[in-house]
Image: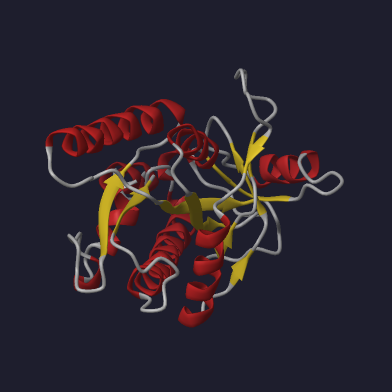
């Protein structure tokens, strides 16, 4: 989503770069929202990388994929701005998809590096599991139902989004280590009015719709405030993760940073 990457790129230390003195290169990519957008954008991106690798003297194929994005909490313990480092990426059982795997897991070394970066940045984080859904979940009642349905036995889903499973599936097929890091934007009990979905991209439409529903303005203001809090959390994490001089991989890398 553009609201994640635009805020990150306001910081000079997070501008896209080529190989630096420490041997690490990063590339930013907006992957879009949902399965089709993710598959389309990542496939084109990897084809372009492979084409450069074939025609150029050096390989441009990435060796790590980091997804940064917002998520909605279904676990009441999650607060706005909390970072989530999930150990599993599940797919909603109600989705009519032919799924080969019940879940995917992040790369262990990237997860370890992310946990160190979060600690260094002083941010609150949780290790709840992620659930990929097919549509925005807008009401507190729907979130509570998802939490009950997907918190059985050892599984405890705490965060929902529309991309983690699909990006993880793509990364597994391409044999690229993967990690998703999410910032909570709406809490478990917080409803999202339909006109506020895509707040950053269609802000004037949202404001115009809110003007006809003045009783919803406090909720819209709260969501706008949540957006800023979540953006700051992602930015602080990205700075710590990408600039960490003690990163695990010291060899020259091309590390793409995807945002939904």
The residue depicted at 47 percent of the width and 48 percent of the height is 177
The residue depicted at 39 percent of the width and 73 percent of the height is 236
Residue 81 seen: no
The residue depicted at 30 percent of the width and 35 percent of the height is 46
Looking at this rendering, what residue extends furthest in the right direction?
153
Residue 57, image x and y in percent? 13, 44
Total numbered labels: 0
Task: Choose top left, top right, bottom left or bottom right for residue 248.
Answer: bottom left
Decide which of 130, 58 is in the foreground and name it: 58
The correct choice, above or below, for 112 with respect to 64 in the image is below
Which of the image's four quarters has the C terminus? top left
Residue 198, image x and y in percent? 38, 43
Task: Choose top left, top right, bottom left or bottom right for residue 36.
Answer: top left
Residue 10, image x and y in percent? 21, 66
Decide if residue 57 is on the left or right side of residue 170: left
Residue 243 seen: yes
The residue depicted at 49 percent of the width and 57 percent of the height is 181
């Amino acid at each position: 989503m553009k609201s994640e990457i635009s805020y990150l790129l306001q910081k000079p230390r997070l501008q896209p770069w080529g190989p630096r003195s420490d041997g690490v290169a990063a590339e930013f990519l907006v992957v879009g929202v949902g399965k089709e957008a993710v598959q389309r954008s990542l496939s084109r991106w990897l084809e372009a990388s492979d084409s450069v690798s074939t025609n150029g003297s050096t390989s441009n194929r990435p060796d790590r994929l980091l997804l940064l994005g917002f998520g909605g909490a279904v676990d009441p313990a999650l607060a706005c701005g909390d970072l989530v480092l999930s150990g599993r990426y599940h797919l909603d059982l109600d989705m009519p998809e032919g799924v080969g795997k019940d879940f995917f897991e992040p790369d262990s070394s990237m997860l370890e590096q992310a946990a160190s970066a979060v600690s260094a940045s002083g941010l609150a984080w949780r290790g709840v599991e992620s659930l990929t859904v097919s549509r925005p979940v807008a009401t507190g009642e729907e979130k509570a139902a998802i939490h009950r349905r997907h918190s059985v036995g050892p599984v405890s889903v705490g965060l929902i989004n529309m991309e983690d499973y699909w990006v993880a599936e793509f990364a597994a097929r391409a044999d690229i280590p993967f990690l998703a890091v999410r910032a909570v934007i709406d809490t478990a009990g917080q409803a999202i009015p339909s006109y506020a979905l895509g707040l950053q991209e269609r802000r004037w439409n949202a404001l115009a719709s809110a003007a006809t529903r003045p009783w919803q303005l406090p909720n819209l203001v709260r969501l706008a405030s949540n957006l800023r809090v979540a953006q700051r959390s992602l930015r602080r994490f990205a700075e710590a993760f990408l600039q960490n001089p003690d990163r695990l991989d010291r060899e020259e890398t091309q590390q793409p940073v995807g945002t939904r």
